[in-house]
Image: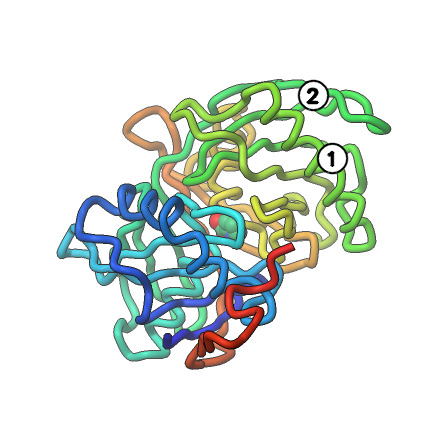
Amino acid sequence: MHVIDSHTGGEPTRVILDGGPDLGSGPLAERAQRLATEYRDFYRSVILEPRGQVAMVCALLVEPVDPSCVTGVIYFDSEAVLGMCGHGTIGLAATLVHMGRIGLGQHRIETPVGVVTVDVLDANTVTVTNVESRRCSTSVKVEIDGIGTVTGDIAYGGNCFFLVDPSPIPVTATNIRQLTDVTVAVREALLAQGYGCDNGAPVDHVIFYGPPETPEGHSRNFVLCPDDAYDRSPCGTGCSARLACLAADGRLAEGQEIVQESVIGSTYRLSYRKGPNGGVIPSITGKAYVMAESKLIFLPQDPFNKGIVL
Ligand code: PYC
């Protein structure tokens, strides 16, 4: 299996170029569902340690249904197959540039939640225009032991997010362990009460917001992903959900640009235009760097051939 690894604002992406399972030729949402239900061992073996690493997202390249797209892609982390992935799409575009498969300019990429576009500005800088994003619920409250009431909005940005602003804990790198524990507790409380997006997807990511640490920043975020790792980047789909909430609250005008900081200080530039269905069409600009090109080997006699599963 031939893979290329990159990172976007510190968040790793592994693009799988060949050697994946045959998922058929139907709509990408159907193929993603097949990957999730029938090939869990496969996808975990590529991403879990010792072959993969914590926080990694894989991008499995598949034939697109729409021939105007340069590729189809299905993203997954070690816990879940994702609808979309913003940092992964920036990493995928930088990888396709590295391979000579695309050049500067605009390209279409098909994902399970729809077609997104990438504008390749240079070998590392990419703007992703995501699917229409929207706020689904406001001021949802959950009780968390030791913290009290946590209030947030639920919004869709290609995945389903719970966004808490302001965070009950300072959003700093020194608090990553506590932020992880509390956001996991928040997600479990939301799931126990059946909260999700209006398309039926359960909340699978939680974001806490704090003040920026740079003069150009709008806010700093901490993003919990489905595998309980935190996103090192500001999270492209999370930023899409955030833009939908800021627009709905009248806190950000169409076309106005802001800078979103991640908990480790990497940044995306964000803006939106109004969508046809009352939501927003987000633009996310970030940088990705290719780090490795490898052939993965799966020896049958290797006791951790399927990854470390605890
Ligand atoms: O950038 O959308 C994103 C993302 C989702 C999970 C990890 N990163």
Q: Is residue 269 visible?
A: no
Tell me where residue 117 appears, x and y as whole percent.
30, 53
Mark 2 lies on residue: 142
Q: Is residue 302 above or below residue 266?
A: below
- The C terminus lies in which quarter of the figure? bottom right
Residues 99 and 130: in front is 99
Q: Is residue 147 above or below residue 14?
A: above
Q: Does the numbered disc 2 mark a residue whose Cβ is under 8 Å from ligand 1?
A: no
Mark linked to residue 76 = none
At 41% from the left edge and 40% from the top edge, which residue is drawn?
158
Tell me where residue 23 appears, x and y as whole percent.
26, 54
- The N terminus lies in which quarter of the figure? bottom left
Residue 152 falls in image quadrant: top right
At 77% from the left edge and 55% from the top edge, which residue is drawn?
173
Q: Is residue 260 left or right of residue 35?
A: right
Mark 2 is surrounded, within 10 Å at the Cα level, by few (under 14), some (14 to 19) or many (20 or more) other residues, namely some
Mark 1 lies on residue: 167
- Residue at the extreme front: 301
Q: Is residue 170 left or right of residue 191?
A: right
Residues 250 and 188: in front is 188
Instruction: Tell me which amino acid carries mark 2.
Output: Val
Tell me where residue 187 appears, x and y as whole percent.
63, 32
Q: Is residue 268 left or right of residue 264?
A: left
- Earlier in the chain: of badge 2 and badge 1, it is 2
Tell me where residue 308 appears, x and y as whole percent.
61, 62
